[in-house]
Image (cartoon, grey):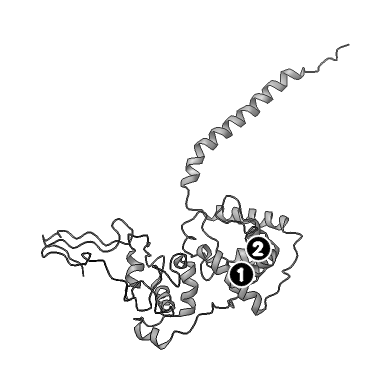
Amino acid sequence: MAIRGRVPTSRWLHPVLLVVLGFLLAGLVGLLLLAPVALTHRDAGNLERAYGNAVIGLVTRVQGAGLGPNPVGSDDRTLEAGRNQFTGSCSQCHGAQGDGRGAFGATTFPPATDLTSADVRNLRDGQLFYIIKNGLGFTPMPGYASQYSDQQIWELVSFIRSLQAGSAPALAVPTPTGEQLSVANLPPGGDATRGAALFAAKGCSACHGPTGPLSINPANDAVARTVREGKPQGMPCFTPAALPDDQLRDIQAYIATFPPSGFLGGPEDVPPPGAGNARPPGATPAPRGVVGSPCATPTPGPTASGATRTDP
């Protein structure tokens, strides 16, 4: 016997399926339309940053819940080990001082985190450990589980805490010899220990080792010009916004500690025959720096008065 008033299932199920299908199609179209916009999105607002920090805090709090406090402490040996690991793997993005101003930190999106910020200070040690070991999806932050042991990751956590406290140990830098100082043309005010950290954080150490054709002689008096202008052989330029003058002086002070056998700027670094810098009289001077780079000076040419600009 049929029950009066009962609506057949098919009469309400079909509209519900259509609504669900409509939402799925709308979501798919939204993804197709928004994906190109997301790829070109380079500036997060306060709300987006707050949401991202909240999600990271929630996920890492859950995932790192069972890790407990840092088991390695913060003695001198631990901080020195953490400093070396940070310099080799983290400073290129997070900067020599952990402020997010490494060679690549400001050019990625989202940009590298300022490890001394309040948001990071508020993370527990276990949360920092989880992030370093596993990385963060949809960000440039990689995971180091396959490169560092748990002990080393905890040492990194300890070193980050010392950066936040302003008590991080400096890299050990040898005192330059009299011979090195006699040939180095140093501007005043540079600090070699800060320069050593910057040399790694700005990516210099990836190419310029202590020996070989890219090693730098302490007598090299073209360091500042090369850093500012770059070179076509693969040397990028650094504007004052990317590398302030005081940091450049620190790097120069660090280079003064290099062995006097370095090639670049040394006695053996001479142009091949016929490759001198002389130009015929009346020839247009070449622009300084790599043509087309953000650091290149304007190409010489006629001025408003009809005169010709020349290099200083």
On screen, residue 187 versus residue 68, left or right, reads: left
Q: Residue 72, position in %: x, y?
A: 71, 72
Q: How many marks?
A: 2
Q: Residue 148, position in %: x, y?
A: 64, 63
Residue carrying label 2: 128
On screen, residue 73 versus residue 207, left or right, reads: right
* Mark 2 residue crowding within 10 angstroms, few (<14) / some (14–19) / many (20+): many
Q: Residue at x 39, y 74 (%)?
A: 262
**Residue type at the position of mark 1:** Ile
* Mark 1 residue crowding within 10 angstroms, few (<14) / some (14–19) / many (20+): many
Q: Quadrant of the N terminus?
A: top right
Residue 267 lies in what quarter of the image?
bottom left
Residue 257 lies in what quarter of the image?
bottom left
Residue carrying label 1: 160
Residue 163 lies in what quarter of the image?
bottom right
Q: Residue at x 42, y 76 (%)?
A: 255
Say the numbered circle drawn on residue 17. none
Q: Is residue 36 above or below residue 310?
A: above
Determine the CA span between mark 2 and mark 1. 9 Å
Question: Looking at the image, do the residues carrying marks 2 and 1 touch, with CB atoms under 8 Å apart?
Answer: yes
Q: Residue 303, position in %: x, y?
A: 15, 60
**Residue type at the position of mark 2:** Leu
> Seen from this angle, which residue lies furthest bottom?
178
Q: Is residue 186 above or below residue 298?
A: below
N-term mark: 2 or 1: 2
Q: Residue at x 66, y 65 (%)?
A: 153
Q: Is residue 272 above or below residue 10?
A: below
On screen, residue 44 versus residue 302, left or right, reads: right
Q: Nearer the viewer, residue 24 or 129?
A: 129
